Structures are given as structure tokens and as C-alpha cells.
Image: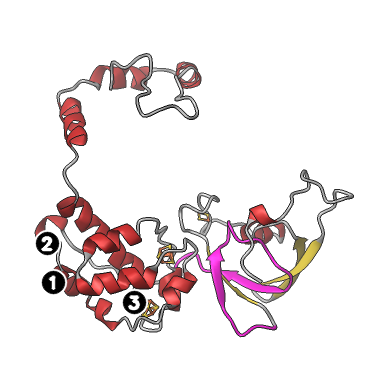
């Protein structure tokens, strides 16, 4: 059985005959609980009485804070996922690993170059990769982790940056790597170097920074800082919102700050 997400399971509102959602047994850190079958692992923890302070951020599959590891009694396989996105299945033995220790190099982007030498100097571990593909199979974002590691070994930072773009830094790849590499730290080094040295400079960002430095937004920001709560709420509620499906050429009526 593959991983199910919330979308695969009907909610109570979507109807299941008598409206009741059946319960399934799961084992949270070894203790058995019966939880509604439609819950994500994250919600199952809370249903069982756990208060999640760490390992719980966006609840939407973006922040990468909720790595989880589980297995089934009839399977040799350890499975991983994001707790906020993975729906419980009967007899899951599960726990959460909100943080996985992985060493991160310290560097000053101004002092390194976008090449293989920088990569190897900061992360010599990169050369330990044996291309086993365990990291790719562990990634909840379906990133081709092994492929970006191969690109990192060649110093192809553009490829690393592009392949790893959707990384949420959950650390699950590192938790399964037999050669103990911190893939996601390697990928973020590549993305930083790519952004700073390889991508063409963004002229509109430079123009905006110049406008900020010239003080174009100072009075507007000062007025906001002085506004009371009611005024801030009114301004927020009355703001012009880009209509759904608006084209590239859409502009707000008040474009004085663009
Ligand atoms: S799990 Fe580790 S050794 Fe295997 S491909 Fe990924 S980075 Fe390389
Ligand atoms: S590459 Fe690694 S850290 Fe990034 S999302 Fe995939 S498993 Fe998580
Ligand atoms: S809580 Fe943010 S990805 Fe799960």
C-alpha cells in the first residue's frame, strides 16, 4: 500500500454512510491508540493527547518541521513522511523526528566561489555518496536527491539548485543515508551560490532597493507604525486583492508604491 494523503480519505462532511469515521489502531512510541482513520499522523498525535510544541509548524507540508518515521508489523521496511501530510493507516508504529542532527558548514558567501572546490572544501562528505538512491526514496517532496548529489559531486551547482528547489529541509534524506551525508545543507549551499553568482542579476530588485534607500516608503511606513489596531484592521480588510486568475499585466488601482 502506498502513502495516502488527506485527499485520499473522505472527511465526515464528505459522507461515509452514517457519517461516522471508523477508527484504526496505531502505535505511538509503542503505545496503542484508536484514532479516526481520516487523521494525519500529526492530528493522531494530538488526538491521543500529545501536545506538539516542536515538530509542528505550518501544518501544510511546507516548513519541513514534522518528519515522521513509521513501519508496519508485517513489513521490514522503515517508511518516512511529513506528519502533517501523511494519513494514518492501521497498525502503524510511528514516532516523530522533528530534528535530525546534521552538521552544517559555516561560510561567508562573499568569500567563496560557485565551484566544485568550494563544495568539497565545505562539504567533503559529498564525495562519500555511493549513489544508492535511499535519499530519493525517503524524500516526501519527491525530489531526485541522489541526482542532485551526483551533480554536487561534479560541481554542477545550477543542476543542484534546480533539482533541490522544493526542499523543505525536513532532514529525512539525511536520516536514511548510509554514508551519513547532510544532503539538504549541501543543496542549500548550492542554491545560495547559484542565486548570488550564477543567476542573472534581477534589475527590478535593484530598482526597488534603490527606491527604499531613497526613502520613498518612509512616510507610508511611519503612518502605519502610528496607526491604532482598529485602523490597521480596517486598512487590512479594505486592501485591494488581486482577483483570481488575473493576468500578468494586472495592477492595483493605487500603484503609487509600485
Ligand atoms: S542516501 Fe546518501 S549515499 Fe545514498 S544516494 Fe543519497 S546521499 Fe548518496
Ligand atoms: S531533500 Fe531531504 S531535506 Fe529536502 S525535502 Fe527531501 S528529504 Fe527533506
Ligand atoms: S508542519 Fe510544516 S511541513 Fe508539516
User: Residue 179: within the magenta?
Assistant: no
Q: Does 244 sit above or below residue 98?
A: above
Give x and y (percent) for residue 197: 15, 53
Give how far across and how far down residue 244 sits, in percent: 50, 28
Is residue 125 shown to the viewer in this render?
Answer: yes
Q: Residue at x 54, y 70 (%)?
A: 80
Say which residue label 1 marks.
Answer: 117
Q: Main secondary structure of the magenta part?
A: loop
Q: In which quarter of the image is ligand 2?
A: bottom left
Snapshot quadrant of residue 41: bottom right
Residue drawn at x 20%, y 27% is 212
Q: What element carries label 1?
A: helix
Name the spot of residue 123 as percent of width and height, x first. 23, 73
Q: Which of 72 and 163 is in front in this view?
A: 163
Reading the image, the residue beneath label 2 is: 113
Residue 139: where, in percent of width, then height?
46, 67
The answer to whether mark 2 and mark 3 are in CB contact below 8 A is no
The answer to whether the residue bearing label 1 lies less than 8 angstroms from the nearest atom of ligand 1 is no
Residue drawn at x 38%, y 19% as measured from the top left? 252
The range drawn in magenta is: 74-99
Numbered label attached to residue 181: 3
- The image quarter containing residue 224 is top left
Labels 1 & 2 near each other (Cβ < 8 A): yes
> How far apart are the two marked residues, 2 and 3, measured between alpha carbons?
22 Å
Report the residue at 40% width, 56% height from top: 166
Q: Is mark 3 within 8 Å of ligand 1?
A: yes
Q: How crowded is mark 2: few (under 14 residues within 10 Å), some or many (20 or more)?
A: some
Amino acid at each position: 500500500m502506498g502513502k495516502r494523503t488527506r485527499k485520499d480519505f473522505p472527511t465526515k462532511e464528505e459522507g461515509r454512510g452514517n457519517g461516522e469515521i471508523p477508527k484504526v489502531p496505531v502505535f505511538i512510541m509503542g503505545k496503542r491508540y484508536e484514532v479516526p482513520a481520516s487523521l494525519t499522523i500529526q492530528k493522531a498525535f494530538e488526538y491521543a493527547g500529545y501536545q506538539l510544541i516542536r515538530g509542528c509548524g505550518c501544518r501544510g507540508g511546507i516548513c519541513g518541521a514534522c518528519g515522521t518515521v513509521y513501519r508496519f508489523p508485517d513489513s521490514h521496511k522503515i517508511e518516512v513522511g511529513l506528519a502533517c501530510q501523511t494519513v494514518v493507516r492501521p497498525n502503524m508504529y510511528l514516532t516523530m523526528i522533528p530534528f535530525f542532527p546534521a552538521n552544517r558548514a559555516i561560510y561567508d558567501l562573499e568569500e567563496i566561489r560557485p565551484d566544485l572546490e568550494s563544495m568539497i572544501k565545505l562539504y567533503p562528505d559529498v564525495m562519500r555518496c555511493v549513489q544508492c538512491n535511499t535519499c530519493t526514496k525517503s524524500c516526501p517532496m519527491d525530489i531526485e536527491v541522489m541526482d542532485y548529489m551526483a551533480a554536487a559531486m561534479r560541481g554542477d551547482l545550477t543542476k543542484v539548485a534546480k533539482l533541490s528547489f522544493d526542499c523543505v529541509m525536513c532532514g529525512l534524506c539525511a536520516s536514511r543515508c548510509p554514508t551519513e551525508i547532510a544532503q539538504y545543507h549541501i543543496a542549500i549551499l548550492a542554491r545560495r551560490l547559484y542565486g548570488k553568482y550564477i543567476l542573472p542579476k534581477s534589475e527590478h530588485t535593484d530598482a526597488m532597493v534603490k527606491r527604499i534607500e531613497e526613502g520613498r516608503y518612509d512616510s507610508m511606513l511611519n503612518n502605519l507604525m502610528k496607526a491604532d489596531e482598529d485602523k490597521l484592521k480596517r486598512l487590512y480588510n479594505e486592501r485591494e486583492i488581486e482577483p483570481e486568475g488575473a493576468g500578468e499585466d494586472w495592477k492595483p488601482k493605487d500603484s503609487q508604491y509600485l
